[in-house]
Amino acid sequence: MNKAEAQERILKLRELINDYRYHYHVLDESTMSEAAADSLKHELSELEREFPELITPDSPTQRVAGKALSKFEKVAHAERMISLADVFSEDEVREWVISNEKLAGRITEFFTDIKMDGLACALHYENGLLVRAVTRGDGLIGEDVTMNVRTIENVPLSIAETDHVEVRGEIVIFKKDFEELNARQKKIGEKPFANPRNLAAGSIRQLDPKIAASRKLRFMAYDLVTPNLPKHSEAYQKLRKLGFSTSGEDKVFTKIEDVFTEIKHLASHRQTLPFNTDGMVIKINDRKVYQKLGIVGKTPRGAVAFKFPAEEVTTTVKDIVISIGRTGAATPVAILKPVQLAGSRVRHASLHNADEIKRLDVRVGDTVIIYKAGDIIPQVKEVLKTLRPEGTEEFDYVIALRKQYPELEFERADGEVVYRVKGENSDLILKRALEYYASKSALDIDGLGEKNVVALVDSGLVRSIADLYRLTEHKVASLERFAELSAHNLVTAIQNSKTPALNKFITALGIRHVGVQTATTLARGFGSIEKLELASEEELLKLPDIGKVVAESILAYFADEDNLKMLAELKELGVRPEMVASGNLPLTGKNYVITGTLSGMGREEAEDKLRALGATITSGVTKKTTALIVGEKPGKSKVEKADQLNVATIGEEELLGLLK
């Protein structure tokens, strides 16, 4: 940004901030959230720091002058560790109460507690001694992290109870401790940690207990599974008597209106709490009724988590891209100037559909308020049109679809808000995605060809790529196409694909415009799927052979909520792509083309081995080609092209020499 652009932006920011201050302090009205206003003030401060000559006395910034494990063992939970359904309004809570009273009669007591933001963990005691600590995992099976949990100062290593006791709670890092840790990181020249929740979870999953011991972790109990006391409130009293820390915010109410008062109270002073929180838990206090109501899916009927209003922040829209999900739906996503929101770095925001873009009138270059409301992808709340640059154009959804997907046709059914790929249905798209995921160029899952994919999808056993890893031999053998042996072979092949090479995994995702070679480039450039997921457009464009179209396609893929959910599920199910080591490889910068049949190995195998050594494989001979690898019955045109361009040709014997 040059000085003239900065001056124009500063003037607009000052005007908007002063207008907010006037409404807030004089008229007792709020034109935007305090968080959004703070974000604008921060941007103004940064611009004035960069251009100090533009600071004036009336600027809002001048108002005030002056011993390690080798791995974690898997452990099955005796009683499933469940998660809670989220609600966002008083009306949703009332509906929850009415629904439960229809099943269980009048509810006489509600138990409430703050919802802590940490890592869920279960502690087991035998004969009064801590014998095991297990993470939530997928709710059914977790990991044994006892050695790390023993380092937590407020976890009792012994309790005054001889029978088996199971205590569940959240492992957290208090805000002041987190700030001290980050201050230490900066002092030693290390990168600061992102947020307390991620740090707590990452610390517990370190194989060396000394690392966990250095992180000031705390265990905050929220449930006593055994012994099973009559009420949740009694369980909390027992927990405290046994020496466990609780939030101190638990209460019992007989009227739901009093619960709403408590919600408002906690929401108003949550910033003063020592730990991070995003809501309040509401349970039916009578545990007999609670347990009788049972579980729906992964959540209990007898409890909900009320989410506090989301934090907000302002940023600018750099681009708008459209992602095609597995159902064929075209979903628009705003690519944002990266900004911190609720403890995480945000780069994308969902725009939902064409009608939402029109309603917001969001354009490339706009300054927007974004927030989180229980979704993986942040949402755009409002466009600050007074900060809109001159020359912005209204976003034309249909033209954008044609430009980004010229080979596809889209339709919008009557009464629907979503554009979908014409003539494609969700099952067909899913089948194609599964076939590609299992293909030789991707994960090469033996037995997962077209016919078996059709059988799995049509039977309802597989509704997503993640469902592949939930298949059991018994379920597969029940299908008409399978016997016990073929079911065993297929499930084994799928389970064996859990640790693929990173480039193969990226290929398997089927990201538009990302083929085998581009996937290899991305794997080398980022080293892990997590880093690729957080990549910015600038970082992508720095890599060789990745232009704006490919970069936008990658950004759109990792901005799609369905894709992020699928990746999270795959990770939860144990799919761990192998990390790629950084640094130059022997054939980095070399370009090869293969023609003809290779007798010692297949062409795909040869290409994979060359790529693993850093080489780039292309389909056609150009001046950039290092050598043409010639097998039996080569393509005449490629050999002639190599002769014309003086490109070296090598045989299979020389190829084997390259691969040593």
Image (cartoon, rainbow, N blue to C red):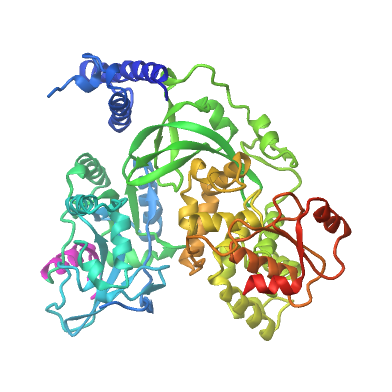
Look at 71% across and 51% down and name the residue there: 425
| Above or below, comparing residue 274 to residue 577 in the picture | above
Residue 470 shows in this picture: no
Left or right of 96: which side holds 365? right
Residue depicted at x 84% and y 58%? 639
Figure quadrant of residue 463: bottom right
Q: Nearer the viewer, residue 396 or 287?
A: 396
Residue 224 magenta-drawn?
Answer: yes
Q: Nearer the viewer, residue 108 or 253?
A: 253
Q: Give the tally of numbered discs.
A: 0
Residue nearest the viewer, comparing 213 with 35 = 213
Q: Is residue 125 above or below residue 526?
A: below
Measured from the top left, where is residue 213 in percent x and y? 20, 68
Q: State the image coordinates of residue 92 (x, y, percent, origin top left).
A: 39, 45
Residue 435 lies in the magenta-colored region: no
Figure quadrant of residue 159: bottom left
Q: Residue 471: which quarter of the image?
A: bottom right
Is 4 rendered above or below residue 44? Answer: above
Quarter occupied by the C terminus? bottom right
The quarter in which the N terminus is drawn is top left
Q: Over which residues does the magenta segment extend?
A: 217-241
Residue 384 percent location from the top left of the image = 42, 23
